[in-house]
Amino acid sequence: MRIEIRPKFDEEVMTSELPIRKAVAKTVKLLHGFTDVTRLREHQGLNFEKIHGFTDPETGEQLYSIRVTQSARAMTCLVNGPTIVLVSLDTEQDKAYRKH
């Protein structure tokens, strides 16, 4: 699976605390091992789920959430076949679904 990282996501990772940065690195490494979206959806730990009613402001693509830690979520979208775009990082799960 190809991974694209948006500048906003990168900035949010860099300003996060070390445990979250390490968890993001682990998650990205895990994503690199997937060959298609089906495996991504089936992985229990990632909790890949559609965020109903939210789209990526840049592309208009549907937004999805991936669990990074118990409280942190990566907002993603899928484009051009097996490509996942890491759009933003929300370190407070309750707020993650409200700000997009």
Image (cartoon, helix red, strand yellow):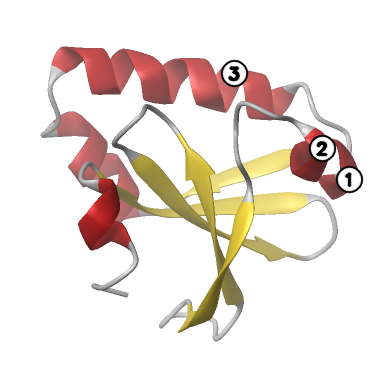
What residue do we see at 38% from left, 44% from top?
73
In terms of secondary structure, where does tag 2 sit?
Answer: helix
> Few, some or many C-alpha atoms within 10 Å of disc 3 (few <14, some 14-19, many ≥20)?
few
Left or right of residue 70, residue 17 in this image: left
Q: Decide: marks 2, 1 in contact (CB < 8 A)?
A: yes
CA–CA distance in space, label 2 to label 1: 6 Å
> Few, some or many C-alpha atoms within 10 Å of disc 2 (few <14, some 14-19, many ≥20)?
few
Which three-letter amino acid code belongs to the residue tagged 1?
Answer: Thr
What residue do we see at 75% from left, 31% from top?
43
| Residue 1 visible (yes or no) | no
Q: Report the residue marked by disc 1.
A: 38
- Quadrant containing the C terminus is bottom left
CA–CA distance in space, label 3 to label 1: 17 Å
| Residue 12 visible (yes or no) | yes
Tell me which label, 3 or 1, sits earlier in the chain.
Answer: 3
Residue 15: image quadrant is: top left
Residue 97: image quadrant is: bottom left
x then y, percent, for residue 26: 49, 15
Residue 42, disc: 2
x then y, percent, for residue 33: 77, 21
Q: Report the residue marked by disc 3.
A: 29
Q: Is residue 29 shown above or below 59? A: above
Q: Is residue 83 shown above or below 68? A: below
In terms of secondary structure, where does tag 1 sit?
Answer: helix
Tell me which label, 2 or 3, sits earlier in the chain.
Answer: 3
What residue do we see at 56% from left, 54% from top?
85
